[in-house]
Image: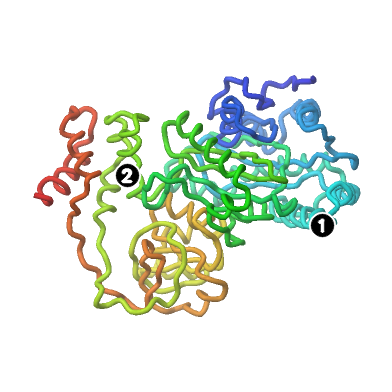
Amino acid sequence: MTTPADPSILVLDGRTAAGREVLGGKAWSIQRMRTLQIPVPPAFVLTTEVCRRYHSADRALPAGIWDGIPAAMAELESATGRRFGVAQRPLLVSVRSGAATSMPGMMDTVLDLGMTDEVEKALAAESGDPAYAADTRRRFLEQFEKVVGYPPPADPWEQLRCAMLAVLDSWNSPRARSYRDSRGLPHDGGTAVTVQAMVFGNRDDNSGTGVLFSRNPLTGAPEPYGEWLPRGQGEDVVSGRADARPLSELAVALPEVYTELLAAAARLEADARDVQDIEYTVQGGVLWLLQARVATRAPEAVVRHAVTLQRAGIITAGEALARVQPEHIRAMLSPRLDPAGVTAPLVSGKPACPGIATGVVAVDADDAEARADRGEAVILARPTTDPDDVAAMAIAAAVITELGGSTSHAAVVCREMAVPCVVGCGTGTLMPLAGRTVTVDAARGAVYPGAVDILPAAAPDDPDLIQLNQWAQAESRENVSDSLLEMLCRSTVEEIR
């Protein structure tokens, strides 16, 4: 087999020793899963060094990089038995960004790349389903034009080049720079560019896509939690454009796939020693994992998981304490709505990040930011969020969406920012609320009219907090922050007694 000569192009075959800083998070995840012999579509990566050189050279692709791409693509062709850029057994690929530190929704992805008139005909003939081939082409055309900024060229190799440059450019997009500024992340890390063979969740009735958490990211329950979207591609779930179904429906429809998925999740959790967030696709009844990373969780889930992982022997008591911050304890002891003031909810949806907030509904990101600048508490309501909404989400008291599930863009970003969030309230339900004052109880997935009184929380007689407190007392102060010790002692020992 041919291998790329440039060391900045790496085939992800499970053998490279490069780390996350070089490969970026997505490619590092693929490499890790290949090492664990978990089914992953073959891929190669342009390392983060390419991005740094690209931007330092005033957005010029480093010499020799493009010349090395055919050899890397040949590895994907060999692994799949397909050919890129030809009509007979065509290979389509995804082109994905991936920084060393996860930046959900901030940079760009193009799926189904390599599509042409001839390739569409070949997919229709191969599958016996022209509608599937047309759907795949539609998806490609829409996403390419949105990400790259113009219609795709006819030549698949030129499509690939354009998409790679767009991903490299997305590292310095205004939304990506704003995201890094808000989190104190450096601007010189760069994104990798991962090129991966496509698998098609929109292929047939035994195909679909979804997201699985190895444990519940909202409540901290130890059971797996996730969503499943038949005949969908990954962007459908992440974007929130489609309402995914409970993971239990995958167990009924494709029980062998479900069992294999849970086994892979357990293997990944044991390897990482932490709760996993997994993106997967099923094509024709065959499971493929696309990414696995440490899950972003609601504060209560952080506490619950720290204790249960220690009890399972996966982490030590010291590690459990290190994963819990005072703000997690504080959130667990959060206030609750006064039952006397709660009427029937205006709308209800799926809890995505717990919390309570009251504010004026803004259905436009610019309006939300303007209201917040005037000192108003704002509830950002959108049909579904995308990266352009992140600045408004960051200043909102809560976020509510009409579409999407607990693994949609809104849910993932809000959990990371600890902003109360309710998703999937129903098409057309939120836009009429513009300008109204509402109270969001995101733990219940409910939006109530007006400002509802909030009662202070009583300290719960919570066994997990008591356990953390006992560990904290046993640990030396060098291993436990003073603020965490103070919070635990005040919240569990004094108030419970």
Q: Residue at x 70, y 37 (%)?
A: 196
Q: Is residue 337 left or right of residue 211?
A: left
Q: Amino acid at mark 2?
A: Arg
Residue at which label 1 appears: 134
Figure disc tally:
2
In the rendered image, the quadrant that contains the N terminus is top right
Residue at the spot 34% in from the left edge and 70% down from the top edge: 358
Residue labelled with disc 2: 304
**How far is disc 2 from disc 1 in space, using C-alphas?**
46 Å
Q: Secondary structure at mark 1?
A: helix
Label 2 with label 1: CB-CB less than 8 Å: no
Residue 154 badge: none
Q: Is residue 408 left or right of residue 88?
A: left
Which quarter of the figure has residue 16?
top right
N-terminal label among 2 and 1: 1
Amino acid tagged 1: Ala
Horizontal side, residue 345 vs residue 32: left or right: left
Identify the element where label 2 is drawn. helix
Could you say which is closer to the camera, residue 185 or residue 3?
Answer: 3
Foreground residue among 329 and 280: 280
Instruction: Name the colour scheme.
Output: rainbow
Q: Residues within 10 Å of mark 2 (few under 14, many from 20)?
A: many
